[in-house]
Amino acid sequence: MNLHEFQSKSILMEKGVSVPRGLVVYDALEALVAARSLKADKIVLKAQAHSGGRGKAGGISVMSIDDDVRSEAGRILRMNLVTNQTGPQGKPVSALLVEEAPQIDEELYLGVVLDRNDGHVTVMASPAGGMDIETIAKESPEKIYLVKVDPLRGLCPFQSRGLAYKLASKNLIANQIAKAVTALYEIFVSYDCTLAEINPLVVSGEKVLALDAKINLDDHALFRRPEMAGLRDRSQEDPVELSARQAGLSYIKLDGDIGCMVNGAGLAMATLDLISIHGGAPANFLDVGGGASEQVVADATNILLDDTRVKVVFINIFGGILRCDVLARGVIRAIKERGLQLPVIARIEGTNIELGRKLFADSGLQIQMIPSLDEAAELVVVKAKELSAS
Amino acid sequence: MAILVNRESRVICQGITGRNGTFHSIACRDYGTNMVGGVTPGKKGTFVDGIPVFNTVEEAVLETGANVSLIFIPAAHAKDPILEAVDAGIKVIVCITEGIPPLDTASALYTVKQKGSVLIGPNTPGIISPTEKCKVGIMPGYIHTPGPVGVISRSGTLTYEVVDQLTKAGMGQSTCLGLGGDPVVGLSFVDCLKMFKDDPKTEAVVLIGEIGGSAEEQASEYIKGEFRKPVVAYVAGKLAPPGKRMGHAGAIISGGSGTAQGKIEALTRAGVTVVENLTKVGQAVRDILL
């Protein structure tokens, strides 16, 4: 679950990290009033959407209070923000953050992640802030300082200070950076984050401010923080992916025309790869999970059939815990309830396969059963091409 | 021979009285596994289809000499049973549970490593050594057959698919194990390759990777330097869009790293036979070994 910049900043403030003065607004007139109330020479309007690269996409404007703040705010609020991270469909702007634009003397980077290779929470700091950490890593890896945190000791004050002194020579500044490092680490651990990042952390005269912040929470740990559920912004998520998740399915939209239903994440990815090897394009990734029930399978079938882009449905199941008969019942029920308009090709293997085949055969539905996965994938692609040609 | 689990393994199940724990404990025993007990706090003195249940892992170990544990405990509470198994001296811990908060896994794993135990998973189908008639996991046992091929994978059903192909191609397996689909897991490809290197019954290894992280790249480095048995690999997720979690919590391309293409190139440079079409893995192994 991702948080907006303003939500991330309010968590940082609670932990004692300074951020620029600002207000969150939802319409253009409010934005003008907010801008005036800040009594700053320069202000910045920032689109609140779950994506990086907002500035390049036109979602961030630095203005003087004498400029036409109201129209500019209106423009940003109405935007569909298409960045290098959102894909062509873009993201709506959920709110506008109106902030004073502070003087910027230096831009630093602070980030905390869990290093999946060694299982250590890792604090990253760099004097080359303002660009993303991947770019820093590529262009000047010597400018990234890392601290691996021992899970039993936690991050020690000397480690925060050590990083801070690498970024700043003045004591006053270094003390504030050390405080921000400690705060960011504590947020990462206490909120079970997948990422906690301040980028840039700016030095502004004698002060250190978090100019931008990103906090992403791990969905698997949200049960520990039920109060965070209210911060979820559903408008930032794809509606089909959202409803699939509520049905217990893992669904991701792609741009092709072959609807896929598979059990298991790895096999689902491999099925997409196989379709592409044969020259086709899948419409989605859909993993019904290892132990799906008949209802979950029926929900999955409906999601595929609801997708108007889909020309052919491909079902690829290797039944382990998920039995082939349960799968067959779910698919047959969903199709019978709505009538079948699309060709369905199924490759089914594993537990209770005979029963599953019999159920499909007796259903009277035109579902083509192909035992070989490679041949099935090939046939699906041929069908999809025939149908888009006609 | 095989790696990690064999005929001598004495296996307990933590969470044996739950639905999945009961079902799979019995399925493992049916396959041939020496299931010596189970643990559910408060259920001491009861039996699950003849398998004795204990209150604590310590007790189970004292009474049965258990050295392997299979864990089915809901994600929110799964850290404690891993630590309990470590403290009781269990050497191989197989954690099936999906969705454990990664920070919980990371902190448990720290202790696992300190005490010299091995954690398989979490979010793994488990481990099976067909040559030793020992299965500690949820995979369908009947698709496996004894033989010379070791299989290491980050995915469950994808492993079944490959094992099924191997069996049908006449290529039996020494040991097959899933590393787990989470971002932080216990065993790595490199850990397993080191064990397969020393296992005389394993003549070739199939490595099944997927997008996310750099475990495949690390395996490539190790293979290039030290691993002399033939390796066939498949990497899933060429079409995965960046920034999206593809079902597994760990299957995500972030900041341009962890792509299938990068992994395929690294493995190829290490001399691994990388198969692009999943359905040709069994044949590729056969071509190498026969």
Image: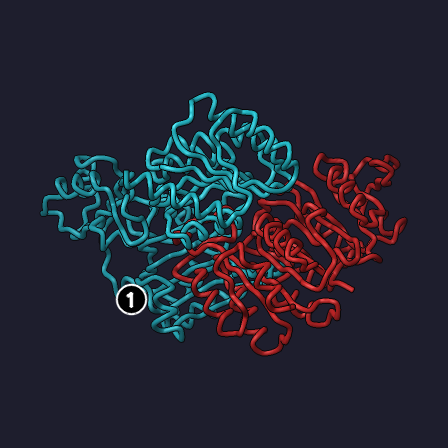
The quarter of the rendered structure image containing the C terminus of chain A is top left
Number of residues whose C-alpha sits closer than 10 Å to that of mark 1, classed few (under 14), some (14–19) or many (20 or more): some
The quarter of the rendered structure image containing the N terminus of chain A is top left
Task: Please say if B100 is above or below A130.
Answer: above
Q: Colour of chain B?
A: red
In the image, taking residue B228 as reference, residue A373 lies left or right, namely: left
Query: Which residue is found at the position 61% from the left and 61% from the top?
Result: A153
- Observer-nearest of A23 and B290: B290
Q: Which residue is mark 1?
A: A106
Whether residue B135 is visible to the viewer of this picture, yes or no, is: yes
Where, by quadrant of the figure, is residue A120 drawn? bottom right
Residue furthest toward the top? A337
User: Total marks drawn?
Assistant: 1
Parent chain of label 1: A
Query: What x and y, as percent, mark residue A46?
Result: 25, 47
Query: What x and y, as percent, mark residue A319?
Result: 61, 41
Query: Which residue is found at the position 77% from the left and 58% from the top?
Result: B131
Of all chains in the rendering, the one displayed in cyan is: A
- Observer-nearest of A138 and B137: B137
- Observer-nearest of B162 and A296: B162
In the image, taking residue B40 as reference, residue A12 lies left or right, namely: left
Whether residue B76 is visible to the viewer of this picture, yes or no, is: no
Query: What x and y, as percent, mark residue A132?
Result: 34, 61
SS type, badge 1: strand
Label 1 is placed on what type of residue?
A: Glu
Task: Please say if A122 is above or below B128.
Answer: below
Query: What x and y, as percent, mark residue B290?
Result: 65, 68
